[in-house]
Amino acid sequence: MTEKVIKINTLNDKPEHFEQLFNIWSQVNNDAENVRFDFSQCSFLRPNAVAFLGGLARLIESRRGSVVFDWDTINNSWVRATIRQNGFAGMFGDSSPSWEGHSIPYREDRSLDLNGISDYLTFNWIGKGRIHVSDRLRDDIVGWMWEIYNNAFEHSASEIGVFSCGQHLWRKKKLILSVVDFGQGIPTNVKNFLRQYAAEDNVARLKSKYCLEWAFESGHSTSIGHVARGIGLDLLKEFIHLNQGKLEVYSNDGYAIIDENGDRYEDREISFAGTIVHITLRCNEKLYQLKDEADSP
Amino acid sequence: MKLSIKDRIGPRCIIKEDGQKIFDEIHGPLKKGETVTLNFDGVNQFASPFFNFAIGQLLKDINETDLRRFLQIESLNETGKLVIERVIENAAKYHGDKDYRKIVDDILEQQAKESD
């Protein structure tokens, strides 16, 4: 059977790099694909790319395909060291020993694992040593980040789970977390929900950016039942504003960005089936002054 | 009635399943007008799914005034209190019978205006 060779370029976290990831997805989005990823042109990989490629490999495998990450093609020592250190290479066949450094591990979750995910966020993401925050603040941040995983599992209907990776940019004093699923996507989920109540023609005309905007508003949820939901993303947004951080969501062809310039929603040219939540926090504890800590003597 | 949340579910108030456990214990007594105290000593991580199920869904048959009167919260930090307040506000205005057809029409109208 023919093997498709996909060259992985240098992948940062600018919109054009996400588009490259979605292009890769579109090249292998079929049943029984046999794919070899070649890293000879790659000199940098952000955690969004690591989480996406890991999830994509599992997606291909779930469709009776096969994936080879060709580790011998890596020329760049930084890339090699990073993906060994964060455990990604070892999870996909690299036999070199990994080591426990400052990298934030690559992680796969098939189900919403309370203690596994909370421990990852608490001890391996924010608590990995280079960020100095109080235990109380660390725990608060874990609670806000949990909302991302909860939404991914509750709404995406991803059959292969959720994939995450993070990174400390210690010179820039920033902390990144990327959470990826290959489920239906937020705009599709919102449309499927609204179809129960409104005419199909009208729902089909809804643009993704408006679906994302609707999903981000407080009290809006696609969950059915007698329990009010829909405040998790709103709480997360507030925290991002307080932190002067950045929250970006790529979902289907919709894009949301929440940062110090406000909340913006866009439709993009390229689409993929799933959602990437990419968060960048500033590691400055003064930004998070907690009211009751500030009040204490 | 007084419940130690840490004893019942541990130090993380995060998932809806744990929230449902607390709801199941306190719903009956609160409905009968008994005072219930939830003690959060030793709990350090919070997220909205827990509170939606533990407290938000109480508002389906207990009004907000009675809930605030009979449900006492102890040893909860400011972040936990913020989440609870949002959950109560959200649940109090929640209606399962929202006019979603109108919501779709409103979004389409907004789309049309922007494309003009």
Image: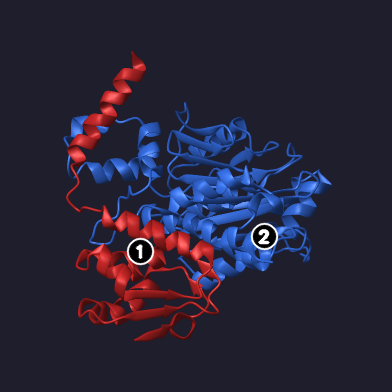
Three-letter amino acid code at disc 1?
A: Asn
Give the Cα distance between marks 1 and 2. Answer: 26 Å
Is residue B7 visible in this depiction of the protein?
yes
Q: Are marks 1 and 2 on the same chain?
A: no
- Residue at image coords 78%, 50%: A170
The numbered mark at residue B33 is none
What x and y, as percent, mark residue B2? 38, 85
> Which quadrant would residue B52 be assigned to in this image?
bottom left
Which of A207/A129 is in front? A129
Three-letter amino acid code at disc 2?
A: Ile
Which of A158/B116 is in front? B116
Of circles 1 and 2, the one toward us is 1
Question: What hue represents chain B?
Answer: red
**Quadrant including the C terminus of chain A:** bottom right
Image height check: is A248 above or below A55?
Answer: above
Judging from the image, mark 2 belongs to the subunit labelled A
Image height check: is A80 above or below A42?
Answer: below
The numbered mark at residue A126 is 2
Judging from the image, mark 1 belongs to the subunit labelled B
Which of A181/A249 is in front? A249
A29 horizontally vs B54: left or right: right
Q: The blue chain is which one?
A: A
SS class, disc 1: helix
The numbered mark at residue B52 is 1
